[in-house]
Image: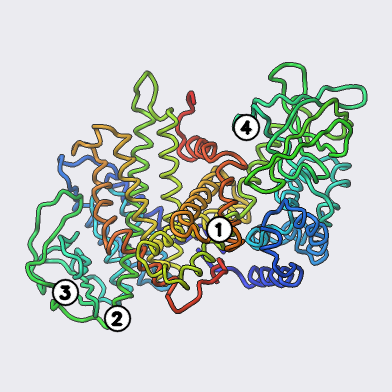
Amino acid sequence: MEFDWSAEHRAFRRRLRDVLERELPPEWPALSGYDNGSELTVAFSRRFCPILASEGLLVPHWPRAVGGEGLDAFHHWILGEEMWSNGEPRAYQYMSVNWVGPAILKFGSAEQKEIHIPRICSGTISYCQGFSEPDSGSDLASLKTRAVETDRGFVINGQKTWTSAASFADYCVLLARTGKEARAPISVFLVPMHTVGITVRRIASMAGVRAMHEVFFDDVEVAASAVLGELHDGWNVTRQVLANERIGVPRYSLTWKGLNRALEHMRQDRRLRQPVIQFGAARCEAALRSARLMALQVIDRRVKGLEVDASVSAARYAAVTADRLVCEFLAENCPDLLDAGADPVVAACYKRSASIGIAAGAAEIQLNLISQHLLQLPKGAR
Amino acid sequence: MDLLLNDDQSAIAEAVARMVERHGRQQVGDAAYLLQSPSLEAALVDSDFLNVGRTDGWGVMEAIVVVEGLAQSAAALEAGASAIVAPGLGAPRDLPRSVALIDVTRPGDVRHLSADGSALILTPQEVRLASGGQLAVEPVDTVYAYPMGRAQKDPRGAGEVLPVDPAQMRRLWRLALGAEAVGLMRAALDLVVGYVKTRKQFGQPIGVFQTIQHRLSECEVLVRGSWLLVQEAAFRGTEETAAFAALMVQQAATRLVYETHQFHGAIGLTLEYPLHYWTYRLRVLQGELGGPGGQGVEAASLAWPPERPVSRDFVQP
């Protein structure tokens, strides 16, 4: 076993930090609030992602043949850590790199690859995820949005919700039933968000200013070529998407940064000398370290070409636990640091932690997957 | 970055598991708190597994693999002090067994402490090694699943001083208890997972119930996270990482002891069933070196000393 980064990995991180230092505006944490849906961050991302692309830093782990640098998946993870801990200045373009692009590369037609991949690689396109519906959250397979086949393609009707970035995304990766029966098979569509019949309503939330939307599809017409993968094979595509999504964002990196900033404040005012604070902080630190190692172990399996099983869910659950622990520690031991204007990074860390156990599959869904696939406990009535 | 066991480490883990299996990993004893296995003890000594840390090309990483694997045996074997602590302190090979670890600042009976064995003695100022009758010891009854002994007088002056910093012994002790606790937790978790698959109530295996599934899944996450922290601490060789690892492990042990007993119900309370061979060793380990509170305060003192700004960089070198 080897727990140190290679010289190549360290150099890659340094390059990222150099770019961030050069490009991020002064007072970035306070200005952006580390909210990747803010007007400022989204506007910044449209300038920043092409810069990352031009320096070979946007999709470093993709093969050269499709626009990447052919580097191992640890580079992708390092990229995620550096970006997320700086409030994700790619806005929601991280999704393009983490799971939309890989899904298109794996399941897309030649035409879809030609349309999407160069734009993802150049940092000039963003997506939203049309999965959850008002009555289909954890039970995603019960979704009702329907795409009916016509002579010209499909007509889509339905409603999506909690959709991040929908008000500024270029495309929606949409799940819809294809067929007339109530439990007809599911297919995945790549739907341009400017298509007639799509209405987006922003939902104010504590997860970020444009982290949640409702998206209504009323007789939205798309071409047959909008289907990603085989028609009716959407569940298979989705499972692979979710596996990438669950481990796509190193959320602990911002949590850790927030914790460290809080500890520095408490070192200066001497609170960090109290054993009860030390113990609480050490518990958080240990949880963060183990969550990070579990995530890195999953990446290591990818790098080695090994099967990535439900250890993804275990890593995700460890991250959820660590986030929650830090959030509780901050609230219980330094509520003053959460006051308005006290420290934007601590505030962002605290605010972000509200959603980690819910987004990308509720924590309890991860536990279901661990019990089925790692412990191999029998599936029963839930 | 390589977070999976390498070929040598995997081979060691498999060989240890085979040896444990041959001597009955989940054997049932004489309805006592403690199970000992003279045959496994003899096989262990013959195997030289306790010296992997002293072997060229191998070290403490391999030693923790051995200790974790041996802990999965129902029988209480002494391995952590012999395979991890003694070599790291430069103590001689093949000390009279078993080797006990004594912290003179914390009173109480000591696991594996015996009159004819050895003891590594941690004081605030020094580390001492007592063996060959240099420390008078009496065996004591115990409700734990370790053989326990009691020093008849203060061990501070016993034996010889080893030329090492006491901090080094604390670090190695934490690794040893971490590796052992992970093996114990893994075995207890395996046992309860097997049990809930077969124990039927309400006409179905209780393992179908989501409350049981979720709580055991959380245990799985804790065991995996603990093991990685112990491995990283062994790799880095720092006091700080060892303290964080021991903190994580001791907290996880508390949870594992509770959950594995809870889902066994009454059968897990009997001495006829083997669960306590693991959990009643965990109960000892979860309080060593000050327990989670002690590890947490020490880890924090090492990670965030008052005179040094807390780094805003979360990345290890």
Colour treatment of the image: rainbow
Tag 1: residue type?
Asp
Which secondary structure lies at badge 2?
loop
Q: x, y percentage for residue B83?
A: 31, 66
Of B250 and A344, which appears nearest the observer?
A344
Residue B128 position (above or below residue B232): below
Chain letter belonging to callout 3 = B
The residue that disc 1 covers is A339
Q: x, y percentage for residue B160?
A: 17, 80
Q: Are the residues flagged by discs 1 and 2 in contact, CB closer than 8 Å?
A: no
Of B231 and B61, which appears nearest the observer?
B231
Q: Are the residues flagged by discs 4 and 2 in contact, CB closer than 8 Å?
A: no
Tag 2: residue type?
Val
Neighbourhood count class around disc 3 (C-alpha, 10 Å): few under 14, some 14–19, many 20 upward: many
Q: Residue at x 13, y 63 (%)?
A: B114
4 or 2: mark nearer the eye: 4
Chain letter belonging to callout 2 = B
The residue that disc 4 covers is A137
Q: Quadrant of residue A123?
A: bottom right
The residue that disc 3 covers is B130
